[in-house]
Amino acid sequence: REAAREREREAEKEREEIREIQREVERQKAAEENERLELLGMASSKLQVIMDDFIRRTDDEFEEHQAKQRKLEENSALIRQRVEDLEREKGKLLVIEEHLGQAEEQMRAWKAAREAKGDRPVEELVGYSDALSRQLFKCTSEDKAIEDALFALDKALANETVDCKSTCSS
């Protein structure tokens, strides 16, 4: 009996040691799981920081590209407007060119008709009694030519057939 009790105590002691080993294994597993979760949390935090930085940089780049796109669209609209303005001005200039061509043709026809009749050139029709008269006539003619040019320019500006900026700069 005593031997049976002794075996029973030893068996109980062995079972207690086994339970203690099992608890130690469970503690180690729990510690490893906590360590794994801690590493996972640190890795997740680092990834979040990297991802936040990436998102911030891409957002900044996106905003920069949108600003460039807006500027390009504004410039494109300005260019289209300028092209339209130039097309209108071109049309007006073509009309003026046609009128000048007609006027030139009329002047040639008139001059040819005068020459065919044997008339003297217009420049020779005016006679001068002295050098001072000739100089006065020449100055008056130049003054009238300038006045006519200014009148034609004023009329063209009023009709918007020429651009004020380009006219004044040239």
Image: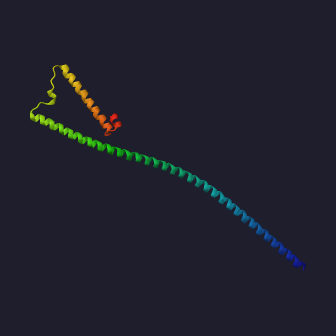
Query: Where on the picture, by quarter, is residue 153?
Result: top left
- Left or right: residue 162 compared with residue 72: left
- Position in image of residue 47 (x %, y %): 60, 56
Query: Where on the picture, by quarter, is residue 4?
Result: bottom right
- Left or right: residue 61 compared with residue 93: right
| Residue at the far right in the pictured view | 2
Q: Quadrant of the N terminus?
A: bottom right
- Position in image of residue 45 (x %, y %): 63, 56
The structure residue drawn at horizontal position 43% and vertical position 49%, both measured from the top left corner, is 73
> Which one is nearer the viewer's eye here, 52 or 11?
52
The structure residue drawn at horizontal position 86% and vertical position 74%, both measured from the top left corner, is 9
The structure residue drawn at horizontal position 16% and vertical position 28%, both measured from the top left corner, is 123
Query: Where on the picture, by quarter, is residue 21?
Result: bottom right
- Position in image of residue 98 (x %, y %): 24, 42
Image: 27 above or below 134: below
- Left or right: residue 138 compared with residue 38: left
- Left or right: residue 85 compared with residue 117: right
Image: 164 above or below 67: above
The structure residue drawn at horizontal position 20% and vertical position 24%, both measured from the top left corner, is 137
What's the coloring here? rainbow
Q: Quadrant of the C terminus?
A: top left
Image: 48 above or below 99: below
| Residue at the far bottom in the pictured view | 1
> Which one is nearer the viewer's eye here, 57 or 74?
74
